[in-house]
Image: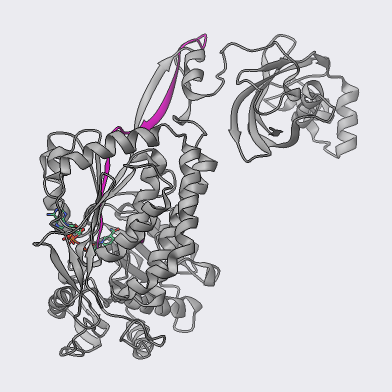
Amino acid sequence: MTARLVSSYCEGEWVAPGAAGSEIFSPLDGALIGSCGDGDINFEEIAHFARTHGGNALRAMTFHQRAHRLKALATYLNERREQLYELSFLTGATWRDAMIDIDGGISTLFVYSSKGRREMPDSKIYRDGGIEQLSQSGNFLGQHICTPRLGVGVHINAFNFPAWGMLEKMAPTLLAGVPAIVKPATQTSFLTQACFAMMIESKIFPPGSIQLIAGGIGDLFDHLGAQDIVSFTGSAQTAGKLKGHEAFTVEGARFMAEQDSLNATVLGTDCTVESEEFTMAVREVVREMTTKAGQKCTAIRRIIVPSNLTKEFSKAVTGELTSISVGDPRNKETRMGALVSHRQKTDVLAKAQMLAEEAELVFGDREQFSSHEGAYMSPLLFHCSDPDSATNIHSVEAFGPVATIMPYRDTAHAIELVNRGGGSLVASIFTNDNKLAREFVEGAAAWHGRLYFANRHTGKEGTGHGSPLPHMVHGGPGRAGGGEELGGIRGVMHYMQRTAIQGNPDLLGAITDSWVRGSQEIHQGPHPFRMHFGELEIGKTFRSKSRQITLEDIEHFAEFTGDNFYAHMDEEAASANPFFPGRVAHGYLLLSFAAGLFVDPDPGPVLANYGLDNLRFLKPVSPGDSIYVRLSAKEKTNRNEEYGEVLWDVELFNQDDEPVASYNLLTMNAH
Ligand code: NAP
């Protein structure tokens, strides 16, 4: 195999490693894979290039435009992903591991694209929450908004997920409108670089949006300021070193960390050897210990089992581990590949030795593969009989196929042990007892970024203890770093600044591409339902004629629908109700009459009524009252080439101009 030069990509050019770059050796046989680092890079200039070229181009797009590009990028990589699998073997990973890394990364791009289009506006400004009325008449309002930071996102990644690690950070960053500089871990940088090269070749994101530093980051931090963000994944030790830099302590750059974590799993007290949860927990432990050879930040390190079941549980896990074949990840039969490097293996064995001071080895052989040229090792299962006095098992992360079983007395004790990790990314609980699950949430949630509950009902549909999902928070308090990556749009917010905007309704509407109550209404031109998506102006308003509601209407509606609720049909009972003066109109009758008042009936650009949001009935309507409707185009979101979605602000008023109902109506309007 020819050694690869793992180049950086800076200011639109590939930069080859220098003579003092690090050599990378294969974990399979020790052969030289390539070299990385010491390229001729001006770190100040790449940060500047990102902020100016990349940042300006990204901020010129709306959230939807960026989300569409994420989808195009995901599709592009998906079509080429098998080329990356071959390289992935050289990280020690099996096919299954490669899929978690590569396919998992691509699917994160797809999810962020979809969420960006559904949950963010087709605008450059994100509204965070609703309008706050700050004055009595409503002429002075408040609205929180988020805009992209004017800096660069620097992503420093761990070695274990060379593709996913890059893509999961990049998706929310680019969606936010912020350029990224990626710095992969040296040992697996060749895979990150190959995936990155595809992204550059695709030309989907504008120049400067993404750059790559293979090797050290030089003096990059000296050139970061208050608008920049560093998102770090790796060991607590490195994080501790980096976050003390003046870029964060003096200049005010944002530092986020996803660190190591002593994740635990708990078998609930309701489980027995025969219960499905017992079998599920055994399977999960074995999967977590052996996937990626245990080099997963979320992997189960501590297995907390009721004391009467530890022996059986240990036996069951041991039985399953016996069938795990360790070896060359390119062989189809291999269930567990190599660790990423000999250095990593040495580190894991040293940490295992620390666990051995407090726990007994019940499965595995530390000497197995000791003379092998590859970085293979046997899974190691420990049993610690006194977890209360032990410290290492709760604090030493052996980042490999290593876990420790420990007994607990009761649920309170299990919660105490789970929390002794000092903050983790995830804890899982196998239980079919909802009360017990709730006890765990109350006692342990504050120490964990994610709690994963599994039982016979979740069955095979459960996504697994160790899988971070783009929809859900990934990160955890304390030792886990305090970060909160992913978690849907929450992950995008790290790259944006929240600002409170205060002003009059028209001004807020102009800033947020929407119509705000109290703003000017546009009445000229045809009925709004006669206007195509592109022609319809935000603020275009229709005020209907009024219609009186009679007792006959109410009775007719009750008979027709079968809704004979006493508030509409029984004067005496209705009067006794604290909300009603007597019989009142059905809320749904008002909505139906409202539609009759504002709809323009002939075929036209409005294709469909898509639903209502935020419906509130504000004041009862009695027989003899009249209602009229105000309908205003509040927001528009393009959906595809045929149609877009219009969100209408609708209010119903009575004869005294008091609001009686309020809602948002959604329609699909043709272009
Ligand atoms: P690491 O040694 O801390 O390295 C992490 C990253 O930091 C690498 O890219 C490394 O680059 C870089 N780095 C190291 N020293 C640096 C410095 N002085 N300046 C700038 N960058 C520096 O961790 P690792 O061994 O790669 O990863 C294993 C650890 O990561 C485990 O503890 C695991 O739990 C944790 N992890 C956490 C998560 C999570 O989401 N919470 C995910 C994966 C892994 P070089 O490789 O070039 O040194």
Question: Horizontal and vertical percent for residue 662?
Answer: 65, 24
> Closest to the observer: 550 or 44?
44
Question: Horizontal and vertical percent for residue 515?
Answer: 57, 20
Q: Is residue 466 above or below residue 545?
A: below
> Closest to the observer: 103 or 323?
103
Left or right of residue 173: residue 636: right
Report the quarter where the C terminus lies.
top right
Magenta stretch: includes residue 219: no
- In which of the image's four quarters is ligand 1 placed? bottom left
Question: Horizontal and vertical percent for residue 55?
Answer: 33, 36
> Closest to the observer: 608 or 178?
178
Q: Is residue 199 visible?
A: yes
Left or right of residue 522: residue 73: left
Residue occupying image coordinates x 19% and y 81%: 30
Magenta stretch: includes residue 139: yes
Q: Quadrant of residue 661?
A: top right
Region rendered in magenta:
135-163
Question: Horizontal and vertical percent for residue 32?
Answer: 19, 76
Q: Is residue 405 above or below residue 37?
A: below
Q: Residue furthest left?
A: 20
Q: Is residue 344 above or below residue 142?
A: below
Q: Is residue 206 above or below residue 321?
A: above
